Amino acid sequence: MEKTYNPAAIEQSWYQTWEERNYFAPQGGESAYCIMIPPPNVTGSLHMGHAFQDTLMDTLIRYKRMQGHNTLWQVGTDHAGIATQMVVERQLLAEGLSRHDLGREKFLDKVWEWKEESGGTITKQLRRMGASVDWSRERFTMDDGLSEAVQEVFVQLYEEGLIYRGKRLVNWDPKLHTAISDLEVISEEENGFMWHISYDLADGSGSLVVATTRPETMLGDAAVAVHPDDERFQSFIGKEIKLPLTGRLIPIIADDYVDPEFGTGCVKITPAHDFNDYDMGKRHNLPMINIFTIDANLNENAPEKYQGMERFDARKQIVEDLSEQGLLVKIDDHKLKVPRGDRSGVIVEPFLTDQWYVAVESLAKPAIEAVENGDIEFVPKNWENTYFSWMRDLQDWCISRQLWWGHRIPAWYDEDGKFYVGRNEAEVREKHQLGDKVLRQDDDVLDTWFSSALWTFSTLGWPEKTDALKTFHSTDVLVTGFDIIFFWVARMIMMTLKFTGEVPFKKIYITGLLRDNDGQKMSKSKGNVLDPLDLINGIELEPLIEKRTKSLMQPKMAKSIEKSTRKQFSDGIPAFGTDALRFTFCSLASTGRDIKFDLQRTEGYRNFCNKLWNAARYVLMNTDGEDCGLNEQLPIELSVADRWIISRLQKTEETFIHALESFRFDLAAQSLYDFVWNEYCDWYLELSKPALNSDGSEAAKRGTRRTLVRVLETILRLSHPMMPFITEEIWQRVAPLSGATKESDTETTIMLQPFPQPDNSKKDEAAEQDIQWVKQVIIAVRNIRGEMDIAPGKKLPVYLHNGSDGDLKRLQQYESYLISLARLNSITWLANETPPLSATQLVGNMEVLVPMAGLIDKDAEVQRLQKEIDKLDKEVRRLEGKLCNEKFIAKAPVNIVDKEKDKLASALSAKEKLIEQLAVINEL
RNA sequence: AGGCGCGUAGCUCAGUUGGUUAGAGCACCACCUUGACAUGGUGGGGGUCAGCAGUUCGAAUCUGCUCGUGCCUACCA
């Protein structure tokens, strides 16, 4: 093995081997375990959030696969309607073309081309991450099978009356020319104005002042409303206003929606351009006057002067005109929430159009119950509240999009505008006996989330009754972020229950959202995104800047992005390798909502990989070609250290498994790190050195070699789900030595080995306590050495004083460990003799003494002792206080009280000993 | 406005049903190239657990309030 761990050298080939050998496919087994990947955008690329969640999924999948479950990780991508169409349209724009120049068919050809061209990016990235997805089952939301499922669902829902077509006010994106759902609208507070406009009464008897943030919509006003109880306006109710600029007459109505405290207490009502006004318009039977085109320019319903004007130009002009006529009372600064399309970024218009809707009420009910009765469980649990609160107040889902890229709505119109829904045109003709009537299919496509909502069952072959569906549905767990609970999770639950009668998944593990160093959300426009592959492969500063600043929505951000990138990554990013990145993700996956990604932790875990690598080198160095106890006939003897590490291993396995089963990847990772570094490497490997180098029995050496190899082999299997590459690489060399494989096995893999199971019979409390004692003595000497500035290489004599019989026995048994690990040249047991003048540390009641002669400075030792005494003194006072409290004695459980008493006793005795020792030294 | 979350060492975070001397990694200080590993070893420093009040023999942990902070939902003419 190479001296240092080099991920690039080992990660490349293993994935290929695994994939070629078809290890990712379900391997059979009694119980199935299935995870559906949340389908990423086919033309997109893997960002840190994906890499994070995919790591967690892969960890679960590899863990379950090793446990012998019939495991499927279903992979695939979605077509991301708006996003993908936008990309292709932008490419066309570069050639000066629009999609209309090409026509629908040719444009779609272009999109498919683009999909073929860019679709490989994300799957390559998944491979580089080590994701053990079953590529043979890869699906895409627009492939034939899934499209069939979409169509089937649409038709069935329509036939049951759960899909309907209606003219409604929708969120209209005037740039993309499509309706979007509530969820795709982002409302943020922005600075704006409140214009106060005077509306004269038609009879000339007075005027009302209305306040508005959108003066241009006045052209579509259908009424002015006041609160029915508002005394100021009683006499106005029922009168008419002569609407400025248009001269149209509109009524003054009373409605208790109006808040008399807000603005002027008079509200202009524009039913065709505001959601609240729309409702009020319906209540009062007001006309819906649409004044916009699909571009949000003013249409023929506006006075001629404004027709064709862009909405904000029109606003300017209208304000100016009102001002000229003396009708503009005042303009106040006003903060307001501005709704923008999450894709286009332009302000969304409430707009009256024909759209298709899913009536969600009847679908929502069972979806709520499934979570209430525990068929579906959120982890962490409190996300259930979020889910419930949204589900209880659900709006019908607008599913049509005025796009070309997507599943075309299976509805056909005849020339009278009558429509028929069916699986295809022929079926429609047949069913409705339309003969050779001219039919035209609906131009619109379905919301991408409509097909994603079917993901868990459509990917398994539905509507066919496939074996896969039977075996793997319901799936076991969904791993996703809270940001798409509404978009996706809730809709998936509704649709899946409706069409399969099963829940889509039994558990939903909601991960935190990955943020950058400063807690900022990673986004391309902020220029703080990291490409997971750059952490794996490393990247120089300049290419990183280039990557972050190219193709920005706002090119002027480039400068500040460059500056902050130079500051944060002055030397670029080193190559950490996939395993280190994956282990970082696991370590960060605690219960928090926000996860700040810290590169330094990745560095730390890269070092951890190196540690594991070198531990393996040490083990191989001492076992390869040696007798590692494979022959059961030969005598074998396990030392206390052997028994100790085996015992600790059982507990680590326990902790790891428990943590993983409860989705605490962080705790699982921590237990692994802790065991490997702080127990196996720091202590066990060191303890094995004297054992192997001594002239002890062959049986004992055999036992130690076997333990070295077996524990390492188990560590590798335990770590494999989180760190697949390094574990496979090392395992291949270690497995034959440990007996996990035979020399003759040429095509084995750690991937398919059994996952470690803790064995209670291998726990050994006595060994743990003995090693605890050994460690304490060694640490005592090291402490003196460190504090007294004695060179680590300098061999020391040590005296043990005031020890018990037990201490003596342990000394006799474990002396070689102490000599070796504490670097001693002698250990002297003092029964009744007076010890030489020494620096002192306590292990229980036993004094560990390092003679001062020539080594230790008197003042330094005085200081060190005083520090210890002060510490103990504090402890004593604390405990005495507690134990003097009668209520504590009376009410606390006996074992707690006893524990405190013991603590006090040992603190007192320790303190006393150190005080004595201090006195001795001071006498010098 | 309503809901949810967070505030623990310089930084990023653990802390299971209240009982520890409040932990880890990184960073910091000192010493050390020792035959697995300087991507390392050994030792060390560092916290009024945001604040206040309460429940309790005992609170980082439970309750209430305050402050700070983040997110979500709704409304804002």
Image (cartoon, coloured by chain):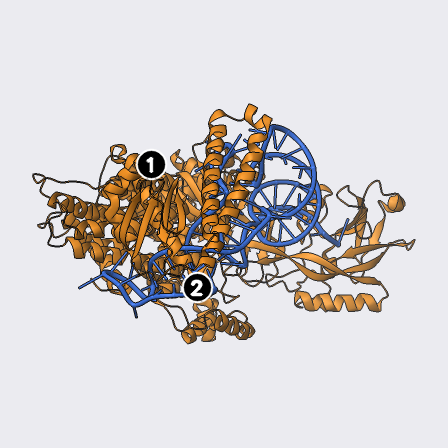
Residue where numbered disc 2 is placed: A530
CA distance for labels 1 and 2:
60 Å
User: What amino acid is at disc 1?
Assistant: Ser
Asked whether A738 or A644 is in front, the reply is A644
Residue where numbered disc 1 is placed: A804
What count of labels does the image hold? 2
Question: In the rendered structure, which disc, 1 or 2, sits on the residue that comes first in sequence?
Answer: 2
Labels 1 and 2 positioned on one and the same chain = yes
Given the image, what chain letter belongs to the residue carrying mark 1?
A
- Circle 2 — which element? loop
Mark 2 is surrounded, within 10 Å at the Cα level, by few (under 14), some (14 to 19) or many (20 or more) other residues, namely: many
Comparing labels 1 and 2, the label whose residue is closer to the camera: 1
Q: Would residue A413 be seen by someone viewing this image from the given angle?
A: no
* Residue at 80%, 45% in the rendered image: A253
- Circle 1 — which element? loop
Given the image, what chain letter belongs to the residue carrying mark 2?
A
- Chain that is coloured orange in the picture: A
